[in-house]
Amino acid sequence: MNQDPREVRTKNSKQIRTTFFPVPGCAQQLVQSWIAELRNLQLWGNDDPLFPATLVERDAERGFQPVGIARRHWANADAARNIFAQAFEASGLPTFNPHSFRHALVLLGEELCATPEEFKAWSMNLGHESVLTTLSSYGTLPDHRRAAIIKGLRDKKAKSAVENADEIAERMAAILQKRLRTA
């Protein structure tokens, strides 16, 4: 997907090229179904917004009510926050704002990415030019997680030291056996 700042509002008016993140569950299928609905039922094209504003019209009592979707972007994120809050409340879940999904994506990237290059690609897919932006803005670790990582590194080092000691012992035994045979 290409987010062109001449067509959509992006942070710092940057052009952002993104690929759908490999998230578990049905998220990708839900987005694909939404796109199919926009294209097939609403006759949406490539230049129309993926998450359009609500179309509001006057009702019989001269009030306003939602009647569908408009072919324009939201003016700001307030409406999206309200929609999220209402959806979470209706499903009995704790409320999260839309931005919290970016935090979740960073946590998923930290788990899935095995190399610096993979995490750089993940960071760029979030629209960040620098991995430091991703790590400093979203990469905070709770104390319990930090402690678990450090313990895991300690265990990894201890295992490596034992494997090295075993390898050294085997070499020494082979050298001693060879010398004993030739003595």
Image (spheres, helix red, strand yellow):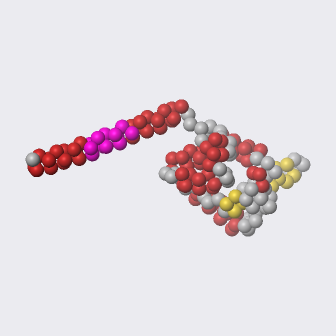
Residue closer to the observer: 108 or 83:
108
Residue closer to the observer: 23 or 79:
23
* Residue 145 can be seen, yes or no: yes
Horizontal side, residue 30 vs residue 6: left or right: left
Residue drawn at 41 percent across, 36 percent down? 154
Horizontal side, residue 147 vs residue 161: left or right: right
Is-magenta flag for residue 65? no
Horizontal side, residue 61 vs residue 13: left or right: right
Residue closer to the observer: 120 or 80:
120
The residue stretch that appears in magenta: 157-168
Residue closer to the observer: 149 or 41:
149
Residue 153, above or below 48: above
| Picture coordinates of residue 8, whole percent (x, y) | 77, 58
The secondary structure that most of the magenta stretch takes on is: helix
Q: Residue furthest right?
A: 62
Residue drawn at 51 percent across, 35 percent down? 146
| Picture coordinates of residue 160, whole percent (x, y) | 35, 42
Residue drawn at 51 percent across, 47 percent down? 111
Q: Residue furthest front?
A: 183
Say which quarter of the image contains residue 88: top right
* Residue 101 can be seen, yes or no: no
Say which quarter of the image contains residue 38: bottom right
The number of numbered discs placed on residues in the rendered structure image is: 0
Residue 33, above or below 59: below
| Picture coordinates of residue 79, whole percent (x, y) | 76, 46
Horizontal side, residue 4 vs residue 156: left or right: right
Locate the N terminus and report the quarter of the image it occupies. bottom right
Residue drawn at 27 percent across, 44 percent down? 168
| Picture coordinates of residue 92, whole percent (x, y) | 61, 39
